[in-house]
Image (cartoon, rainbow, N blue to C red):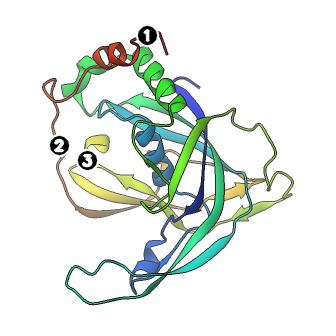
Amino acid sequence: MRNAIEFMVYGDYALFTDPLTKLGGEKLSYQVPTYQALKGIVESIYWKPTLIMVVDAVRVMKPIRMESKGIRPLEYGGGNTLANYTYLRDVCYQVRAHFEFNMNRPDLAYDRNENKHHNILKRSLRAGGRRDIFLGARECQAYVEPCVFGEGDGFYDNYGGDLHLGNMIHGINYPDETGRNQLEVRLWSPVMKDGYIEFIRPEQCTQVRTIMDMTPKRFDDANVSSAEELYAQLAVGGNP
């Protein structure tokens, strides 16, 4: 696929929180990563407001296992609270994603250099990302490295059936990506087939709810370096 990257992300713990479990101060992870969590990982590898990162598929490489921990959340009003957080334990995923230009940002049209952005994205992936990588929550440190999507043995390769995961969060619609001055949440019902989940695109989600009104942040060439400038900085000493 055009402008695509394929990578493996892994860590000791992951917490893709089901929002329904937050009401009582507890947190319970979904069984698999959400589209939004994986998109956040791609954006931690390389992000520019000129681009929209699109996650195409994820492959679950290790068995789905959970572990509960007693956590003392930070109480800003004082006091001492104990909560149970249920994490995914020892996780590894293969991810396939690509980028598209954000046509809702005409103010950044000068930065639409497809080849340069793709080279920077691949170079950033080989370096382990431009920002810290997390699996759903900041305490869940993770690592990324390039891979060939579909290569290697996965735990669910011969599962022999579909695993229906129920209704869950797909992701968040931000106003600068949709052209609507609203923050929205998307829901969907994924199905895992032999360890693979093929994501539908955000605009294909039929269950969309508005959270709040919001206007996009504006950027200009004074606070966003062009792809050419960034590529020149990274390519010192050789091409990516």
Rendered position, 21 above or below 193: below
First in sequence, mark 3 or 2: give its number: 3
Q: What element carries label 3?
A: helix
Residue 9 placed where, x, y %?
59, 46
Number of marks in the image? 3
Instruction: Estimate how packed mark 2 is, as few (under 14), some (14 to 19) or many (20 or more) residues with alpha carbons within 10 Å.
Output: few
Instruction: Estimate how packed mark 3 is, as few (under 14), some (14 to 19) or many (20 or more) residues with alpha carbons within 10 Å.
Output: some
Q: Is mark 2 on a helix, strand or loop?
A: loop
Going by the image, does 65 lie left or right of 51? right
Residue 175 placed where, x, y %?
26, 47
Please identify, in this view, whether the residue under mark 2 or under mark 1 is nearer the observer.
1
Q: Say which mark, if any, is on residue 237.
A: 1
Going by the image, does 205 lie left or right of 104? right
Instruction: Estimate how packed mark 1 is, as few (under 14), some (14 to 19) or many (20 or more) residues with alpha carbons within 10 Å.
Output: few
Q: What residue type is labelled 2?
A: Lys
Q: Does the residue at mark 2 contact the one at mark 1 (Cβ under 8 Å)?
A: no
Rendered position, 175 above or below 76: above
Residue 222 placed where, x, y %?
12, 25
Q: Say which mark, if any, is on residue 175.
A: 3
Q: Which amino acid does label 1 sit on?
A: Gly
The residue that disc 2 covers is 217
Q: Quadrant of residue 165?
A: bottom right
Q: Residue at x 50, y 31 (%)?
A: 127
First in sequence, mark 3 or 1: give its number: 3
Q: Which residue is drawn at 51% across and 64% down?
A: 16
- Separation of disc 2 and disc 1 at Cα? 35 Å
Q: Which amino acid does label 3 sit on?
A: Pro
